[in-house]
Image (cartoon, rainbow, N blue to C red):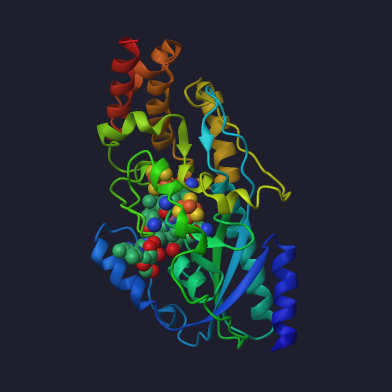
């Protein structure tokens, strides 16, 4: 067992994962209750019982893929959270680990669609912060987390024993900085307020949140960046990958849009490279930019059949015409 876990650690490190922890494959009952009580549908595709995914499962391996923040980009550059770049890399790295376990005769399921933070909490990877993120000792909230489900018998790690991170005792920086008031200080997130909920969303962003989107193209990092636990890892050097997008690329000619979509697909995945959704978010940010030079690109989008794109473009045109 020890040899197996040692080798798993070495292989995981070679794929960019900083640390791994192991928990058992019993159901995540607390999480199921919390997600039902929240009733927003986010989490509906997540399975609370690992053995529904893999009946012979014994262990859930929790892996952390850490990342470094960059300076916030200034307009006309738009902001893309580093989390999405790390998460994309972790997503593509994980199958190699599963294949290795399968090669040894075990069953292994990468991307098992389980609740990630509760698995990490139970495996002792860290605790919840008031910002709703899983805070690890080494990297604070700056990790993309990945799970691997397996029937291999691995030594279990013990949970840390409390829900809330010790650092949160005398701190509420994330709660104060959240632009929408989505955090109540318990570690729960009001998803009807969190800006991330409305990015690449199937409906227009509620009017009251459009200006708050500011320059954010993908992800909101305010509650993570404000956290002192995150600052403590900023001294470490990690390879930083960037996705530099500008409003001029996103709202430019067909060729420049194509180039932007290609880069988005390559670095954060095809889910975020759908033209109408990309343009819908770009239209909001153009409205927030105060730059009337985006009007010629926005005006034709006001007639789009894609409802969020049409609504956002109309909003942005109106806003820019008033400046
Ligand atoms: C749905 C989802 C979202 C939703 C909802 C977020 C949420 N907190 O639920 C939205 C779209 C808003 C979102 C946003 C973001 N997300 Co997200 N998201 C998820 C996803 C798919 C499921 C989360 C989930 O299970 N929610 C359901 C709730 C009920 O579960 P929970 O938060 O674990 O709830 C527990 C506690 O909060 C607590 N609790 C809940 N309610 C209450 C109430 C009280 C009173 C108390 C005391 C406790 C309590 O008990 C619950 C029991 O487990 C996970 C991936 C996955 N498969 O798990 C990623 C994940 C949580 N997201 C992640 C990230 C990075 C983000 C963003 C930072 C992305 C960004 N840059 O914009 C933001 C951060 C927003 C925030 N402050 O949390 C990472 C977090 C990594 C980490 N180190 O923690 C995850 C794990 C993805 C990953 N694979 O790495 N996300
Ligand atoms: S900012 Fe403060 S309160 Fe929020 S998660 Fe970090 S330590 Fe906890
Ligand atoms: S991601 Fe942004 S909007 Fe969502 S809870 Fe954090 S600071 Fe608030």
Q: Is residue 187 above or below residue 279?
A: below
Which quarter of the figure is the N terminus placed in?
Answer: bottom right
Q: Is residue 298 above or below residue 161?
A: above
Q: Is residue 158 above or below residue 269?
A: below
**For the point 66% across and 67% down, which residue is it?**
19
Q: Is residue 23 above or below residue 230?
A: below
Which quarter of the figure is the C terminus placed in?
Answer: top left
Residue 176: x percent and y percent?
39, 43
Q: Quadrant of residue 124?
A: bottom right
**For the point 28% across and 59% down, which residue is it?**
41
Q: Mark yes or no: residue 29 visible.
A: yes
Q: Would residue 77 be found to the left or right of residue 13 on screen?
A: left
So how many labels did they put on this image? 0
Q: Quadrant of residue 51?
A: bottom left
**For the point 52% across and 30% down, which residue is it?**
78
Q: Would residue 294 be found to the left or right of residue 249 on screen?
A: left
Q: Would residue 66 be found to the left or right of residue 207 on screen?
A: right
Q: Mark yes or no: residue 113 visible.
A: no
User: Which sits in the foreground, 108 or 293?
Assistant: 293
Q: Quadrant of ligand 1?
A: bottom left
Residue 275: x percent and y percent?
44, 35
Q: Quadrant of residue 16?
A: bottom right
């Amino acid at each position: 067992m020890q040899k197996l876990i040692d080798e798993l650690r070495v292989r995981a490190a070679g794929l960019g994962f900083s640390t791994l922890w192991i928990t058992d494959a019993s159901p995540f009952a607390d999480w199921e209750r919390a997600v039902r009580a929240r009733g927003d549908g986010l989490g509906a595709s997540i399975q609370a019982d690992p053995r529904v995914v893999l009946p012979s499962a014994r262990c859930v391996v929790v892996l952390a893929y850490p990342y470094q923040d960059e300076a916030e980009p200034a307009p006309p550059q738009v902001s893309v959270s580093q989390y999405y770049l790390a998460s994309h890399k972790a997503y593509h790295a994980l199958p190699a680990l599963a294949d290795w376990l399968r090669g040894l005769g075990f069953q292994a399921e990468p991307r098992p669609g389980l609740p990630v933070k509760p698995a990490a909490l139970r495996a002792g990877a860290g605790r919840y912060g008031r910002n709703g993120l899983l805070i690890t000792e080494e990297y604070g909230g700056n990790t993309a987390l990945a799970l691997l489900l397996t029937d291999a018998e691995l030594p279990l790690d013990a949970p840390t024993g409390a829900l809330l991170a010790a650092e949160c005792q005398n701190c509420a920086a994330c709660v104060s900085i959240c632009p929408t008031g989505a955090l109540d200080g318990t570690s729960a997130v009001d998803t009807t307020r969190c800006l991330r909920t409305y990015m690449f969303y199937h409906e227009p962003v509620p009017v009251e949140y459009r200006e708050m989107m500011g320059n954010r193209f993908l992800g909101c990092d305010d509650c993570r960046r404000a956290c002192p636990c995150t600052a403590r890892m900023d001294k470490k050097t990690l390879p930083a990958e960037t996705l530099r997008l500008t409003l001029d690329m996103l709202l430019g000619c067909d060729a420049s849009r194509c180039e932007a979509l290609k880069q988005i697909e390559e670095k954060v995945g095809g889910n975020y490279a759908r033209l109408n959704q990309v343009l819908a978010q770009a239209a909001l940010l153009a409205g927030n930019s105060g730059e009337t030079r985006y009007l010629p690109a926005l005006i034709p989008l006001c007639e789009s059949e894609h409802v969020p794109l049409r609504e956002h473009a109309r909003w942005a045109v109106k806003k820019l015409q008033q400046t």
